[in-house]
Image (cartoon, rainbow, N blue to C red):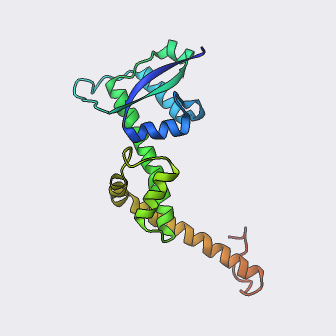
């Protein structure tokens, strides 16, 4: 066996995300950023908040770590490191959710349908991550993502339209062609 595992307490939707994307045990070597984060947290061993933190995450997940990482940094995350890892993964997962939902909302799909599609496509059943919790997060934080997407989408469509019209001779030569902007 060339690897060891560490067990980390996580929220249910974080566990679902990790196992859906990286298997069980979670093989984070496929994601260098996440791998570096876990190694850093093992190495750092911060305990600053350990006395005040009450970690009560209902699920656990096993991360696969290399033998080298095990021997260099150990196999236990402190409460502080566990909290930091959960916050990092939560931000990342919620960002994915917001982008997916904003993209679909931008083309006119109702919010409830966007959320259901997200839950189905990324395997987040209602008991793991409720539609209500996703809706609240999107309502609080997703509008900015949606407006940026709409602006970028509109600009790209206009650019394609102008290039097509200019190349077909419908517009005058004063409009810039591709690469002349």
Residue 159 location, x and y as percent? 64, 73
Residue pictured at 48% horizontal, 54% vertical: 118
Q: Residue 51: x, y in percent?
A: 23, 23
User: Quarter of the image containing the N terminus?
Assistant: top right
Is 153 or 1 nearer to us in this picture? 1
Q: Is residue 102 above or below residue 18?
A: below
Horizontal arrangement in the rendering, residue 114 relative to residue 52 (left or right): right
Q: Quadrant of residue 116?
A: bottom left
Query: In this image, 159 relative to 27: left or right?
Result: right
- Taking the view exactly as shown, the residue that stands out farthest to the right is 168
- Where is residue 88 shown, x and y percent of the image? 41, 39
* Residue at x-position 71% and y-position 76%: 163
Note whether 162 is above or below 150 in the view shown: below
Query: What is the quadrant of the C terminus in the image?
Result: bottom right
> Which is nearer the eye, 134 or 155?
134
**Residue 49 image point, x, y percent:** 27, 27
Q: Looking at the rendering, which quadrant does residue 83 occupy?
A: top left
Is 63 left or right of 10, judged from the image as shown? Answer: right
């Amino acid at each position: 066996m060339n690897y060891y595992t560490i067990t980390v307490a996580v929220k249910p939707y974080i566990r679902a995300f990790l196992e859906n994307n990286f298997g069980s045990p979670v093989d984070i070597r496929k994601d260098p950023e996440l791998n570096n984060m876990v190694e850093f947290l093992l190495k750092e061993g911060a305990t600053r908040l350990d006395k005040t933190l009450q970690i009560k995450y209902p699920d656990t997940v096993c991360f696969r770590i290399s033998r080298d990482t095990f021997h260099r940094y150990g196999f236990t995350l402190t409460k502080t490191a566990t909290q930091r890892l959960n916050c990092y993964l939560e931000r990342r997962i919620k960002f994915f959710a917001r982008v997916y939902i904003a993209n679909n909302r931008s083309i006119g799909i109702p919010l409830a349908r966007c959320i259901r599609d997200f839950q189905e496509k990324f395997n987040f059943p209602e008991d793991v991550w409720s539609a209500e919790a996703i809706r609240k997060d999107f309502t609080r934080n997703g509008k900015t993502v949606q407006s940026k997407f709409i602006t970028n989408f509109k600009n790209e469509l206009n650019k394609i339209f102008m290039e097509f019209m200019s190349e077909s001779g419908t517009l005058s030569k004063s409009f810039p062609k591709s690469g002349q902007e």
